[in-house]
Image: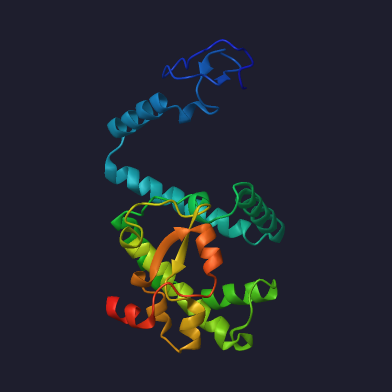
Amino acid sequence: MPTTTTINNTCFYCGSQALYISYNSKKFRCVEKISQCPTISKKQEKARQQNISVEKRLNHMKIMSKKGHSKLRELHKDKKWVSNKSNKISTAIKKRGGHIGQNNPMYGKKHSDTSIQKLSTRAKNRNPLSYLRATKTKINKGIAIPKEQKTSWDLYKEQVNNYTVKSWKYYQHLINPTNLKRGLQYELDHKFSIFEGFRQGISSRIIGHFKNLELIPKNVNRSKRINCSITLKKLQEIL
């Protein structure tokens, strides 16, 4: 339970600021679940390393993961559970102000090379039908438009956005060398605008290229609208 006293108590285990007190032992602790205390976590990890080999631990984790996935598969058959989970996620995202820029939990973070390789392998091995089912679900829920109903402008914007996302992911250090914070104050802008690219029949790959991207103040980007900050000739020169 949280402490109600105003005394500057410290955690019995690690010595940091205490925010909770144990119901039975009445000892102050820094976290609600004692297993999350840094000192306790280190002790538990040390004990695990002494009592179980790395190979046995990995096998154990695989078994637990398999059991966990099996449980999740069962839960996902329950429409009510899925609906409640979706609502919780939507509420959490709204509470933090969206999923863009600094509000994204992965903002400023990068996956390790190992994680990237695992994600890539998983995506390649995924059944193509799963993407079709996901698209169909979005269409049925009214949050997506069938491809055949989209205009050429919609399809072009979609393609540009796909290339833009990849450019930001792999070339963020070149697009944003001064490390400005994307989000509330700065926005990602296409120097040669998407609208003008569509009007002149320029490849979506070129418009979404990292050399056509820059981070500019939000008010400047909004006032720029569909205008271009560079000419097509200049864009072709820098590519």
Spot occupied by residue 156 in the image (x, y as percentages of width and height): 51, 82
Spot occupied by residue 215 in the image (x, y as percentages of width and height): 42, 60
Q: Nearer the viewer, residue 109 or 196?
A: 196
Extreme residue toward the top, this view: 7
Q: Nearer the viewer, residue 158 or 195?
A: 195
Residue sitting at 48 percent across and 15 percent down?
10
Quarter of the rendering occupied by the C terminus:
bottom left
Applied colour scheme: rainbow
**194 to 10, vertically: above or below:** below
The answer, for residue 204, to whether it is visible in the render is: yes
**74 to 43, vertically: above or below:** below
Residue 156 lies left or right of residue 15; in this view the side is right
Residue 113 lies left or right of residue 1; in this view the side is left
Q: Nearer the viewer, residue 62 or 23?
A: 23
The answer, for residue 128, to whether it is visible in the render is: no
**194 to 21, vertically: above or below:** below
Q: How many marks?
A: 0
Residue 80 lies left or right of residue 112; in this view the side is right
Residue sitting at 56 percent across and 10 percent down?
7
Residue sitting at 38 percent across and 45 percent down?
60
